[in-house]
Amino acid sequence: MAANKLNLKDKYRLLTRDLDWEFSYQERKKAFPFEEFEGIKITDWSKWEDPFRLTMDAYWKYQAEKEKKLYAIFDAFAQNNSQLNVTDPRYINAIKLFLTAVSPLEYQAFQGFAHTGRQFGGVGARVACQMQSIDELRHVQTQIHAMSHYNKFFDGFQDWSHMHDRVWYLSVPKSFFDDARSAGPFEYLVAISFSFEYVLTNLLFVPFMSGAAYNGDMATVTFGFSAQSDEARHMTLGLEVIKFLLEQHEDNVPLVQKWIDKWFWRGAQLLSIVGMMMDYMLPNKVMSWKEAWGVYFEEAGGALFKDLARYGIRMPKYVEQVQTEHMSHQLWWTMYTHGHATGFHTWIPTDEEMDWLSEKYPETFDKYYRPRWELAKQMEAEGNRFYTKALPQLCTTCQIPMLFTEVDDPTQLSFRDTVYHGERYHFCSDGCRDIFHEEPEKYVQSWLPVHQIFQGNCGGPGVEQVLSEYYGMNLGADNLDIKGSPDEQRWNRWKGVA
Amino acid sequence: MPVRAITPDYVGEVKDLQANFHGNQLVYVGWDHHLMFCAAFAFPLPPTTTFRQLRDEVMVEGFSAHPEWKEIDWDSTQWLLNGEPFIPQLDVALIDQGIDHKSLLRFQTPELKGFMGAAV
Ligand SMILES: [Fe+2]
Ligand SMILES: [Fe+2]
Ligand SMILES: [Zn+2]
């Protein structure tokens, strides 16, 4: 007779490794058709070390406890009208950006891990991906619930998933994940689990969660905490994937290195959004983007890559080209000057904020960026708030407007191009150009919002109709400067400010 | 290998063929060292547009907000077409002087240093 209770070790074996079976009437290869086409060689799946060491029943129990606490806090947050406790209504725009740019990526991660989890011949990897997949679904749900409270009081929250699929600047995060999900399962894991979750995720979550804490947003702090123990598991999976692939076969090394180079660069460009939030959108600043990069990438990443050197892995190729000194300023200027076409508000930094930026970027802010804001102030004072009139050129790979400057000249935009099968393609950087060169047949398909508008695929005929009808923005409420916005007017009324 | 795909000989659909722009071609125009404009602009234009129309009508829409726009001396302005030095012919169609679909034109006005002399 079986014992009622299994000990932990048996339970773990039965509920993970033992879930696999021998294939009697089908070839194993046919059951896992995605496993070989990328060129990765796996000789022995049993060498996979399960990173989570968690069984499904324990998993449900932990997660249910976390959810209970989380939703109790959301309820209290709503009942106490805690939206009034944020520093000022500018802060809320960082949350609008999070909901439209980042939360849908949690959903994409859920889909990605569900798919990849099905594709591995090794049961350990399958179970780990399945659990992460469920985590990611939980993340998107808790984020929606946390932010739904703000939707009752502020503009711009109404149609976040629709916007994610359509709005010009949201094609940047969307295409990042589309790229990963349309790759093979091993590249997906190197892209998302290792390059993003392990190497870069602290640069996304720490700034957002401390930013929320510094600015009185307890709802966001709480979902951040609730996701943290999940993230710790995701990072372990990222590291296990890399070690496993590198130990399985030496032929895997150059493939993995290429993917690290690619996904590090794509991730660094994507995170310029976080840089802009830290340096410009948080009324109470946590630290500068440059400082965050120093702590979370240069120090932590430096040690990691030193560790991986024994496998023949070196630092990501384009690490010297990441312009943490400049990217946040250049991106916020882009958003400010396109503020008629953003689903959140933009503004000129206050004098005190500009002084903080001079202090944090002593070599560059006063020289290159303060003059832009002086011009913006002058134009605004003349009753002519600057909104740019024409649409920008976009990078074919990262889809960011080609706003970055040359590494050795911050006064000159960086232009790269190539001709493939008679068509010319443009890029913001060497990294993005080289990624295209590796797989041109993939990136010739880039859905570049500016080109799509000109092809007539986004409604129109004018930009106004694209914004309101195709993107779903409430013009005059969601977009434009924070000054004079309905958000600001309501806030002042609540606070009794004339 | 032009793509790492499970489908043999996978070929992607080129999204931005000129044929998809309803008779227009795309032309990008950027003003070097003038970062009031965060990036070069993209304009959909009939290939028969003359350079004069591009300069005096199309570009005005994008660039004229700049305080230095009126000070540009077009006779001394230098141009780059897809990275190569280029001398425009004002009354010739874009396509007839080599400015084809998705070409990038950059212009340089070295005597104008940008707002506050800061390349803005
Ligand atoms: Fe997540
Ligand atoms: Fe995660
Ligand atoms: Zn790029």
Image (spheres, grey):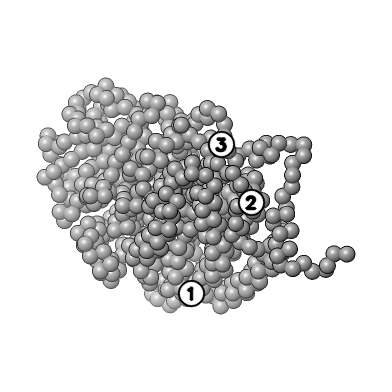
Instruction: Residue A467: give x, y in percent of width and height.
Output: 45, 47
The answer to whether A69 appears left or right of B49 in the picture is right
- Disc ID at residue A37: 3
Instruction: Residue A58: give x, y in percent of width and height.
Output: 69, 66
At 37% from the left edge and 40% from the top edge, which residue is drawn?
Answer: A434
* Disc 2 residue type (three-letter): Ser
Question: Would you call the spot at circle 1 few (<14 residues within 10 Å), some (14-19), or many (20 or more)?
Answer: some
Q: Earlier in the sequence, mark 2 or mark 1?
A: 2
**The C terminus of chain A lies in which quarter of the figure?**
bottom left
At 69% from the left edge and 55% from the top edge, which residue is drawn?
Answer: A17
Residue ID for mark 1: A84
The answer to whether A32 appears left or right of A383 in the picture is right
CB under 8 Å between discs 2 and 3: no
At 23% from the left edge and 47% from the top edge, which residue is drawn?
Answer: A412
Q: Can the viewer see residue A476 in this picture?
A: no
Q: Earlier in the sequence, mark 2 or mark 3?
A: 3
Q: Earlier in the sequence, mark 1 or mark 3?
A: 3
Give the spatial CA distance, label 1 vs label 3: 54 Å
Image: A168 above or below A281: above
The answer to whether A248 appears left or right of B72 in the picture is right
**The N terminus of chain A lies in which quarter of the figure?**
bottom right
Q: Chain of mark 1?
A: A
Image: B6 above or below A256: above
At 70% from the left edge and 65% from the top edge, which residue is drawn?
Answer: A9
Instruction: Residue A388: give x, y in percent of width and height.
Output: 32, 48
Residue ID for mark 2: A46
For the residues beneath circles 2 and 1, the answer to whether they share a chain is: yes
* Disc 3 residue type (three-letter): Phe
Element type where label 2 sits in the image: helix
